[in-house]
Image: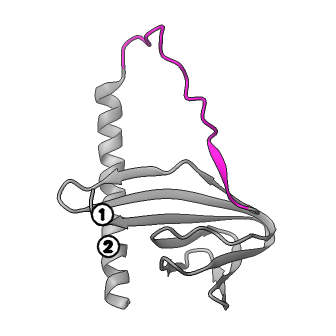
Amino acid sequence: MGLFFRKVFVTSVAVSGALAIRSAGAQRATEPTQRPATAQPDQRPEYEVLAKGIVANRPFQTPFATAPLRLEFRNLIMGRGESEQIPVPTVILMELRQGAITTTIDRDRRERHQGDFWVVEPGRTITMQNPGEAAVVRALYIFTGAR
């Protein structure tokens, strides 16, 4: 698990940097000089309920051209209270970005503090408890296999 976590962490840091550079360059290259009259703003909600007690932004997805791998970045936000079980469709690398929470992964309760990282494997159950006002968790969903 240690080696896997290190590989995933290093990959996610590298991908985050590459995405920031890529999106900045792509935005400059594709900015139209004039907005077409037929363009409609995106009407989808910015956030969706992931589980009772937690909302998440729309996933930012990035596939890899050189490997059967796709990453999805999401911010999970919760107020004071306890969430219901959060779906775990794949390996999720989580980082507590704001606040302090307690996670329960398959009955294993752990306190998490700002800057903590942890991994949740598919098939596991996870809930979160937040005693504070707000907590923000960055979730990196790692999908492997066929593209």
The residue lying at 59 percent from left, 50 percent from top is: 57
How busy is the neighbourhood of tag 2: few (under 14 within 10 Å), some, or many (20 plus)? few
- Nearer to me, 1 or 28: 1
Q: Which residues are magenta?
A: 32-51
Image coordinates for residue 36, horizontal then vertical, percent = 43, 10
Colour style of the rendered protein structure: one colour
Say whether marks 2 and 1 touch (CB < 8 Å).
yes
Q: Amino acid at mark 2?
A: Val
The residue lying at 17 percent from left, 58 percent from top is: 66
Q: Secondary structure at mark 2?
A: helix
Q: Quadrant of the C terminus?
A: bottom left
Does 33 lie within the magenta span?
Answer: yes
- Nearer to me, 102 or 99: 102
Q: Is residue 32 left or right of residue 115?
A: left
- Residue under numbered circle 1: 14
Q: Quadrant of the N terminus?
A: bottom left
- Residue under numbered circle 2: 10
Q: Is residue 123 left or right of residue 125?
A: left
Q: Is residue 66 left or right of residue 87?
A: left
Does 89 lie within the magenta span?
Answer: no
Image coordinates for residue 10, horizontal then vertical, percent = 32, 73
- Nearer to me, 39 or 106: 106
The residue lying at 54 percent from left, 64 percent from top is: 138
Q: Amino acid at mark 1?
A: Ala
In the rendered image, the vertical position of residue 74 relative to residue 100, given as above or below: above
**Residue at far left of view:** 66
Q: Secondary structure at mark 1?
A: helix
Q: Which mark is residue 22?
A: none
The CA distance from mark 2 to mark 1 is 6 Å
